[in-house]
Image (cartoon, rainbow, N blue to C red):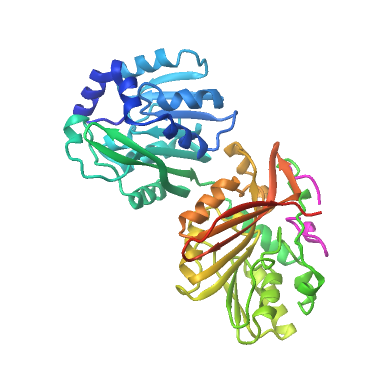
């Protein structure tokens, strides 16, 4: 831990009794939530910072390749050694969270449980932990929500009276982490004079694959990529493998009536993994935003459905794609579509100006999906609908498996575990989140299932949620 002197003295003193004390403060459920939201893989190298007597380490050690246990208190480390003696994959390190004795970019996942509120400078500690993460590595912090129980400064040497969750998101982003999720654990800390909520905050180290993605899609738009031969899709039959990534095929699921009247060059140029319009129930006069419109197929279908009184805005980051879509719209006489240059996490669209958002196998190409869903929520009007098709993992991967830049362009490396994807949708404020999973076209990558999912959500009052598996014949 990064401890002020009173805090270090406190933990040195209570080290022999800490495990029994901790069990009275919070349950093993806190540890399980931290593990569940960290998507551990047996090949991961992990660390437990401010490990104390080994509460988190006891659950993590059996699930990873190696675990580094770090604490500022020699007495606490000694207790941890005794409690964790059964695990040969653990090494022990004396150190503080603002100066960790570990190599940079050496870890896949870092845990810090009930440590941050003892740190004099929480942001500095978060940045120091992030420094140790490999690209795609994850930081998981569990700690106290903001509270007013001032007596805990004296009773338990607390430096901070918990934290505001918005501050946690900001600090994670300042530390270079993306897909930041700050949520409740559903558990409380029962301190001697208080019961305080416990949050979980997670984020991943940036991989920075966006330049490669944009270059790849520009080549496809110009017809310079063999992946985009006529009638084929780059995100589309074959075995998904990060070693042989170019053989991916997804089925868009478009009926003939969907593509009737759509410019042929758009209908033949689909890079999607589903049909986001299948559940959108578009109505005449509505305004539709297509995030990552590409060659314009979904935009053109939406334009037909909303009719001349409606409009469609296609947003894409690739100028060559925009040029292709604009020429198709002009040649086919579509007057209710505009195509704008922009990125998914900073949409060139006004607040509350859109009725429906669609997106087809694009959000997985963006690194910070939390920001994408926040932007989607911003631009939707009240009761606006989100309908996206995307690729997700049905299990956990090593961060190194997600750094393949070609894999990012092929809609695989940028995919998230399905539950993490849905958590980020809900965190943005959406309700009625429904996930329909297609297993018929799924395959695997590095032994982990990969498949397309259609996510529906509403910017409005919660009515119901569901999670369905739909297998197409």
Please say if 413 is above or below 268.
Answer: above
Q: Is residue 243 above or below residue 41?
A: below
Q: Does the magenta stretch include residue 237?
A: yes
Q: Where is residue 238 in the image (x, y as percent from the top left)?
A: 81, 48
Q: In which quarter of the image is the N terminus?
A: top left
Q: Does the magenta stretch include residue 416?
A: no
- Look at 51% across and 61% down and name the residue there: 463
The spot of residue 341 in percent (x, y) is 57, 71
Query: Would residue 405 be seen by someone viewing this image from the given angle?
Result: no
* Left-right relation of 185 to 164: right
The answer to whether residue 342 is left or right of residue 29 is right
Q: Report the magenta residues as a range.
A: 225-241
Nearer to us in this view, 466 or 381: 466
User: Can you see residue 340?
Assistant: yes
Query: Where residue 472 sits in the image (x, y, percent)?
Result: 78, 54
Q: Is residue 287 left or right of residue 440?
A: left
């Amino acid at each position: 831990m990064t401890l002020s002197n009173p805090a270090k003295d406190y933990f040195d003193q209570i080290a022999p009794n800490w495990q029994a004390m901790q069990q009275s403060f919070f349950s093993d459920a806190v540890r399980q939530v931290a593990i569940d939201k960290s998507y551990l893989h047996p090949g991961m190298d992990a660390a437990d910072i401010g490990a104390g007597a080994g509460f988190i380490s006891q659950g993590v050690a059996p699930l990873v390749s190696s675990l580094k246990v770090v604490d500022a208190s020699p007495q606490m480390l000694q207790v941890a050694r005794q409690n964790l003696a059964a695990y040969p994959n653990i090494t022990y390190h004396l150190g503080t969270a603002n100066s960790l004795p570990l190599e940079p970019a050496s870890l896949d996942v870092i845990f810090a449980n009930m440590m941050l509120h003892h740190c004099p400078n929480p942001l500095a500690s978060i940045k120091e932990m992030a420094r140790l993460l490999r690209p795609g590595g994850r930081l998981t912090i569990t700690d106290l929500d903001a509270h007013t129980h001032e007596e805990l400064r004296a009773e338990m040497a607390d430096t901070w009276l918990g934290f505001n969750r918005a501050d946690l998101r900001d600090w994670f982003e300042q530390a270079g982490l993306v897909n930041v999720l700050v949520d409740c654990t559903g558990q409380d800390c029962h301190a001697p004079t208080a019961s305080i909520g416990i949050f979980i905050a997670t984020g991943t180290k940036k991989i920075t694959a966006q330049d490669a993605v944009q270059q790849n899609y520009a080549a496809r738009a110009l017809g310079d990529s063999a992946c985009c031969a006529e009638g084929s899709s780059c995100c589309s039959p074959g075995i998904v493998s990060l070693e042989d990534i170019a053989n991916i095929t997804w089925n868009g699921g478009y009926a003939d009536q969907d593509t009737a009247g759509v410019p042929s060059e758009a209908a033949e140029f689909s890079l999607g993994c589903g049909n986001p319009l299948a559940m959108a129930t578009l109505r005449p006069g509505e305004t539709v935003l297509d995030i990552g419109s590409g060659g314009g197929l979904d935009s053109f279908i939406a334009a037909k459905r909303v009719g001349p009184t409606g409009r469609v805005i296609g947003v894409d980051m690739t100028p060559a794609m925009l040029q292709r879509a604009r020429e198709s719209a002009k040649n086919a006489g579509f007057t209710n579509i505009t195509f704008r240059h922009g990125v998914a996490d900073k949409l060139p669209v006004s607040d509350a100006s859109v009725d429906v958002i669609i997106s087809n196998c694009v959000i997985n190409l963006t690194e910070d999906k939390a920001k994408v869903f926040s932007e989607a929520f911003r631009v939707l009007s009240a009761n606006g609908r989100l309908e996206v098709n995307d690729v997700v993992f049905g299990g956990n991967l090593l961060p190194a498996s997600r750094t393949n830049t070609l894999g990012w362009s092929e809609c695989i490396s940028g995919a998230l575990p399905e539950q993490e994807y849905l958590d980020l949708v809900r965190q943005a404020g959406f309700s009625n989140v429904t996930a329909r999973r297609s297993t018929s076209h799924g395959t695997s990558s590095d032994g982990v299932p990969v498949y397309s999912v259609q996510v529906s959500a509403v910017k409005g009052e919660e009515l119901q949620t569901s999670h369905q598996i739909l297998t197409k014949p």
